[in-house]
Image (cartoon, rainbow, N blue to C red):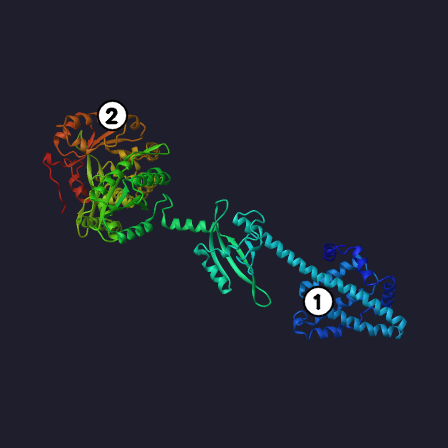
């Protein structure tokens, strides 16, 4: 037997023996089979003639009207019906016949044709066949009655098969439901509502897994929905009391001590009298979801890099601390890392992130358990000290933090010097709300930076004015870049041998429309901290190169242009390309440009610096080490650097020739430069005696007020058109062109 009918016969165990048993029980013997064959031979081949009236009747029943939508459907079904009943009398009632009958029954069950309509079809068939048999045998009793009896037997045999297919379909559905429940990833249970404590009478494997229970161990146990413990069951108890559905989320502590979160859905099961007999429940393991929610809540209130509370959580804790303060003051400590941006720019963000994590750990180690340390963002951290016994305690904590952070940090084989500046604001003296306390602690922190970094400072009222000034400068500097308020002034560099101008250094100045000229010492630190130093530096480079090209066209001989590079600019991977692009746009030879980089910038990462310097030198650009003597570079480091010039820092020039120490230092630097084949330039030369001493140590060039102050381009032309520096000591004067 093949096909669905054959499979069903095997599932229903209707084999040859079962078929023979059913025929024997119905007394369907060989004589009956022969009578049915004789009847089959005399029946018309085109049908029994009863289906037309039968289907007309079926279409009058609303439940069947949807199955018999149109004439084409009815015609197709009538033909199938005729074939079905014609085979009924064919006389072959073997396994293949049974399989075909079962397949028809399964099809009818699948489309929703109820057994009552099936039985109605047999009734209509038998009624029609009674007349057919009577007519075919001319009413002969000896032929009509045995034939009708045989026809009734085979009809009941078929009807039994049909009803079996319906029962089998129901069993299939029930078995599928049972398998689905058993296979469900959700825990499912049934509790008997007619007994005390609602004992569990069924649980699926997922329920047992959720509770960590052994197979069968929870059957008969009280239902978890009857728990009278945590408030998590309140919704379920209410649902039971009102006979309605309920849901809740519960925390289960299993026998193996593992904590699980489950979502419980409970619904009553009612009998025909509408009385609640059972409860069915579904457990959905939501541990992962709850863990994810906890992680999201943690991320919403904590810094993902360091794990410290973030700004939002710190504000919340500070607000609550202010609200519940009964005695003692509060202190807010605001701190950031000194020169952290240089670490990020020089070594990359991975090193910067590792440094921040180490700082977070060190800060936490400096505080009491009841104190709070948070990361606000970037390199900014803030500390809340509650129940402060006195201002001196805040100072002690700040000093402890400064000392702990001052210890070097080793990351990736690099030893990073770390320091922090700390600002302290006290409640209620320096503010009564979180915003004010944080703002004033921030202001105090900037005062600590101005005082020399690495220390701490308490807030004082006059600091607000300075903070506003700094903010005004920052905002104004952005406008200055956009509106052309920044000017480039030029200071001559002269040959000490003949006094001729050997080059100029381009220096930026800010002509503020309201405040007048603002010195670089006031706005350059702000530019560096905010990142504005990069566009500012490019503006100075472009403007100075254009000016040098203009002087060339006008016949003013300025052999070389020196331009300072900030640490941020120097760390740009495409620095050489950026500089050469500007030179190409203006049409200026790279040999005319000298870039000045501070010694500390170069020494911060000597290996990377060497590569950057090589790229610049390969383009024909000269490189000078500015402020030499302040960066603690050694001779072994210096000789690796592809540079052209050393510029002695002005702090060593101030004391010569009177200071024996400065004389020794300058002499040593000069000797070093000669041994390395480097040109030597002295900065800050203001007196003839300084100039004369520098000549004795074979310093080639110098710059300073002795030779000329930084001047706007047009004034510089008037003073130095001859190509010689104008020195007040030589009887010259700083000119002004009308």
**Residue 9 or residue 544, whichever sits in front:** 9
Tag of residue 672:
2
Question: Is residue 94 toward the left or the right of residue 418 in the image?
Answer: right
Q: Position of residue 215 (x, y in %)?
A: 58, 48
Q: Quadrant of residue 50?
A: bottom right
- Give above or below for 50 relative to 600: below
Q: Quadrant of residue 570?
A: top left
Calculate the distance from the C-alpha at mark 2 to the C-alpha at mark 1: 112 Å
- Could you tell me if residue 564 is visible in this image? no
Question: Is residue 85 toward the left or the right of residue 446 in the image?
Answer: right
- Could you tell me if residue 424 is visible in this image? yes
Quadrant of the image for the N terminus?
A: bottom right
Circle 1 — which element?
helix
Q: What residue is shown at x 20% (from left), y 27% (from top)?
A: 665
Tag of residue 608:
none
Q: Earlier in the sequence, mark 2 or mark 1?
A: 1
Question: Is residue 220 toward the left or the right of residue 649 in the image?
Answer: right
Crowding at dot 1, Cα within 10 Å, few <14 / some 14-19 / many 20+, comes out as: some
Tag of residue 115:
1
Badge nearest the viewer, 2 or 1: 1
Q: Position of residue 129 (x, y in %)?
A: 81, 72
């Amino acid at each position: 037997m093949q096909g669905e009918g054959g499979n069903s016969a095997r599932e229903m165990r209707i084999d040859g023996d079962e078929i023979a048993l059913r025929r024997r029980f119905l007394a369907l013997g060989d004589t009956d089979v022969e009578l049915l064959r004789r009847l089959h031979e005399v029946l018309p081949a085109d049908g029994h003639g009863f289906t037309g009236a039968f289907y007309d009747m079926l279409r009058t029943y609303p439940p069947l009207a949807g199955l018999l939508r149109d004439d084409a459907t009815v015609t197709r079904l009538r033909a199938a019906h005729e074939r079905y009943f014609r085979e009924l009398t064919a006389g072959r009632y073997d396994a293949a016949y049974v399989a075909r009958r079962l397949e028809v029954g399964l099809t009818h069950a699948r489309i929703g044709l109820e057994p009552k309509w099936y039985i109605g079809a047999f009734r209509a068939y038998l009624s029609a066949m009674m007349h057919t048999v009577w007519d075919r045998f001319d009413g002969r009793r000896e032929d009509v009655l045995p034939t009708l009896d045989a026809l009734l037997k085979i009809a009941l045999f078929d009807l039994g098969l049909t009803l079996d297919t319906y029962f089998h379909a129901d069993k299939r559905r029930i078995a599928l439901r049972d398998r689905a429940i058993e296979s469900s990833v959700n825990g499912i249970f049934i509790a008997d509502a007619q007994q005390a404590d609602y004992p569990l009478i069924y649980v699926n494997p997922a329920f047992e897994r959720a509770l960590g229970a052994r197979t069968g161990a929870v059957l008969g146990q009280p239902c978890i929905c009857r728990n009278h413990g945590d408030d998590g069951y309140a919704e379920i108890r209410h649902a039971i009391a009102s006979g309605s559905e309920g849901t809740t989320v519960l925390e289960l502590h299993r026998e193996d001590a593992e904590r699980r979160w489950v979502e419980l859905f409970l619904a009553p099961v009612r009998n025909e009298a509408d009385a609640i007999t059972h409860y069915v429940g579904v457990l959905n393991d939501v541990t992962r979801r709850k863990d994810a929610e906890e992680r999201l809540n943690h991320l919403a209130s904590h810094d993902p890099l360091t794990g410290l509370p973030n700004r939002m959580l710190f504000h919340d804790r500070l607000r609550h601390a202010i609200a519940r303060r009964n005695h003692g003051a509060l202190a807010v400590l605001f701190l950031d890392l000194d020169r952290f941006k240089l670490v990020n720019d020089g070594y990359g963000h991975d090193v910067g992130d590792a440094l921040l994590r180490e700082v977070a750990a060190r800060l936490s180690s400096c505080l009491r358990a009841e104190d709070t340390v948070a990361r606000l963002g970037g390199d900014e951290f803030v500390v809340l000290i509650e129940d402060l016994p006195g201002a001196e305690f805040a100072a002690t904590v700040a000093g402890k933090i400064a000392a702990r952070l001052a210890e070097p940090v080793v990351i990736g084989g690099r030893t990073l010097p770390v320091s922090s500046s700390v600002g302290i604001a006290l409640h209620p003296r320096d503010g009564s709300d979180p915003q004010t306390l944080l703002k004033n602690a921030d202001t105090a922190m900037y005062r600590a930076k101005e005082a020399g970094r690495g220390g701490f400072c308490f807030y004082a009222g006059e600091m607000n004015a300075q903070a506003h000034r700094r903010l005004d400068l920052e905002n104004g500097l952005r406008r200055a870049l956009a509106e052309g308020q920044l000017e480039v002034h030029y200071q001559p560099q002269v040959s000490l041998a003949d006094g001729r101008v050997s080059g100029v250094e381009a220096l930026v100045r800010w002509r503020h429309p309201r405040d007048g000229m603002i010195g670089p010492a006031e706005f350059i630190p702000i530019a560096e901290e905010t990142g504005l130093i990069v566009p500012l530096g490019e503006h100075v480079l472009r403007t100075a190169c254009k000016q040098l090209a203009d002087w060339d066209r006008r016949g003013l001989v300025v052999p070389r242009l020196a331009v300072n590079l900030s640490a941020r600019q120097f760390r740009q991977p495409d620095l050489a390309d950026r500089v050469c692009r500007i030179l190409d746009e203006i049409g200026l030879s790279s040999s005319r440009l000298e870039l000045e980089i501070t010694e500390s910038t170069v020494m911060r990462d000597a290996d990377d610096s060497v590569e950057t310097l090589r790229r610049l030198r390969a383009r024909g650009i000269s490189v000078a080490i500015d402020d030499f003597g302040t960066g603690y570079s050694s001779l072994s480091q210096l000789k690796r650097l592809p540079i052209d010039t050393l510029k002695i820092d002005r702090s060593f020039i101030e004391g010569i020739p009177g200071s024996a120490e400065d004389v020794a230092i300058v002499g040593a630097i000069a000797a070093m430069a000669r041994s390395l084949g480097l040109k030597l330039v002295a900065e800050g030369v203001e007196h003839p005696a300084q100039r004369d001493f520098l000549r004795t140590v074979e310093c080639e060039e110098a710059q300073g007020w002795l030779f000329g102050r930084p001047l706007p381009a047009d004034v510089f032309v008037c003073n130095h058109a001859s190509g010689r520096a104008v020195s007040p000591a030589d009887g010259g004067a700083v000119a002004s062109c009308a």
